[in-house]
Every structure is written in structure tokens, then in C-alpha cells.
Image (spheres, grey):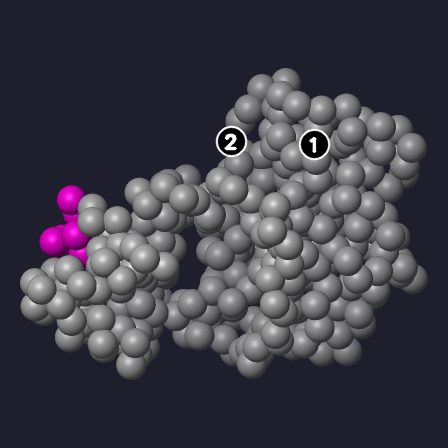
Amino acid sequence: MKVSVKMITYNHAPYIAQAIEGVLAQQTTFPVQLIIGDDGSTDETPNIIREYATRYPERITAVIRDKNVGMVANFFDLDSYIDGDYLAFCEGDDYWDDPHKLQVQVNLLEQNRDYGLIYTDVRQYVQGIGFNTYKSAKTPSGSVLVELLNGNFISTVTVLVRTSIYNEVCESVHEAVLKNKWRMIDYPLWIEAARNHKIGYHPHPTAVYRVLGESASHSDDPQRQIGFVKSVLDVVTYYVNHFGIYDQCRKGIANKVYKMYRIALKYNLPSLNMYREEFHRLGACSKKTGLYLSLSKNTLTEKLLGAMLRCR
């Protein structure tokens, strides 16, 4: 048995060594193969990767590109190098801080043959600030397709999936990502895997997700914030229609529309009217969004709500 680890990276020179070391530090009874795909970095990332690949030639496969090909191509082009029965993921700015992560997850999947993927808790590190307060949440396990479409609770850096299941869904995910120009790959992977397989949850933090100043999922730019939420909504809408389960996932869809309305309100964006109209059409999905819905129906209270958001 063997585990492969896919690591995509771009201009992660300050972090890539820690990401690599977290994989190399895994204490396992099986070999671990690290596949690193550098997407034409312009900093020292390629040199750091080459140094590690030279020191650990039997453990690291380095794919260093001369030019940037984009996240999607960089991610899927590494598939031809996968040689493990199981597959894990760790992007170049994240890292594993539990040396037993892979061994525990493999044991769980070996003992539960009806499960196809195991994920764990994760700690979040905000660059320049520090760790957020960690608290393990009650997280779904088993047949979780509907729950997953209502909100993504799986952190990529924690995942271990059977390679056979990854191979089963990766082609259709690749096609859907390219066709719909989605900003993410991981969420569609978990959704398609969850359609026919059980998903397991291990309530222990095994990894650290690093929040940088600007990234695909985190930004100070409100238009980019809305763009990311919209991309998530596009993914959910695509699959709920494809699977014919819209009514079961209406809450998740309404929550994402609320998030876009809230961003537009906070920054007083020109698109506010459009998101308000959609928010009113779908309605509230919780007590909090119900309050926002009520206040948004009056111009004065909506303006006061926007001012309160800007003060935070």
C-alpha cells in the first residue's frame, strides 16, 4: 500500500518548506509519495522544491513549470504521477502538523470499506495575526451529499480519499470546472464523491489552513468576495439541478444569496438592488437572515444596517 500527496504551489517561497516538511514528517507503516506541481513561480519556490527533491529523490516528484498554466491545469496535470492507493492534498501555503495524520486516516478507511473519503478538523492561521480560536464542530459523517451542498465543511488540506474514487470522479469534475469556469476544484470533487460514497469525519485537528492577505477565497476587495461566493453558488446550483435535489438544498442556496447581499450592503455596491431582490425572492434560511430580510424591506432600516456593518 502507498499514499500519494498532491501539492500545488505558486509563489509560496515563505511557506513551501513547512508544507513539504509536514509531509516528510509523517510516521507511517507505508510509503508516502509527494508530488509537487509548481505553476511557474517567480520567487524562490522552484529552487526550494528542487533542493528537497534532490535530498529525497525516492519520496518527492517535482513538476516545475517554466510558465504559469493556471490552477486547474497545474492540479489535474499531476494526476499522471499518482501511484498510491490513497490520495491526500496539501497546497504550498498550508501544512500538516500531526505526524500521524495519514496513518490514522488510512487505518480508518481500511477498517471502514464502505467509506470513500476521510476528513478531519483543521486549525486556521491568519498570516500576520496568528491562530484563530479552535473549536471542534459537530460535523456530518456518512451519506452527506445534501449537507455538503448546503455548505462545504471539508477542508482540503485534511482530506484522504481512495484513489479509485478520485479516478472515478476527476474527469467529470475537470470538465465541469473548465466548462463553468469555477474558481475551485476541491468542492466539486467532494460533492461528486459524496453522491455514491460515504464520507468519514475524524474529530481531531491534523492540519493548518493558512489565510493570506489575498487569495481566491479570502480578499479585502468586495467584488472578489462576491465573486467567490457566486462561484460557490454556481457549483451548488449546477449539482442540485444535475442531481434533481433543488428543494433539499434551497437553504444552502438562500444562504449564499444572503452572503452576497450582505457584502453588497456593507460596501454599498451598485449591485445592491439586484442582490436584495434575489434575497427577498429566496427568503430567510435562519433567524439571523430573517432579521436581515425584515430590515432590508425598509430603506431607512436597511441604511442603518449597512452603517452598522461598516463599523465592524
Report the Cα–Cα distance between label 2 and label 1. 18 Å
- Tell me, yes or no, whether the highlighted magenta stretch contains residue 273: yes
Q: Residues within 10 Å of mark 2 (few under 14, many from 20)?
A: few
Quadrant showing the N terminus? bottom right
Q: In the image, which is nearer the foreground, mark 2 or mark 1?
A: 1
Q: Which residues are magenta?
A: 270-276
Give the amino acid at mark 1.
Answer: Ala
Kindly identify the residue that appears in the image at 65 percent across and 62 percent down: 123
Looking at the rendered structure, the secondary structure element under dot 2 is loop
Specify the farthest residue to the top: 66
Kindly identify the residue that appears in the image at 29 percent across and 81 percent down: 287
Picture layout, residue 295 above or below residue 79: below
Looking at the rendered structure, the secondary structure element under dot 1 is loop
Q: Earlier along the polypeptide chain: callout 2 or callout 1?
A: 1
Do the numbered discs 2 and 1 sit on residues whose CB atoms are within 8 Å? no
Residue 289 found in image quarter: bottom left
Q: Give residue 305's position: percent from left, percent from top.
A: 21, 64
For residue 70, the mark is 2
Kindly identify the residue that appears in the image at 67 percent across and 76 percent down: 203
For residue 13, the mark is 1
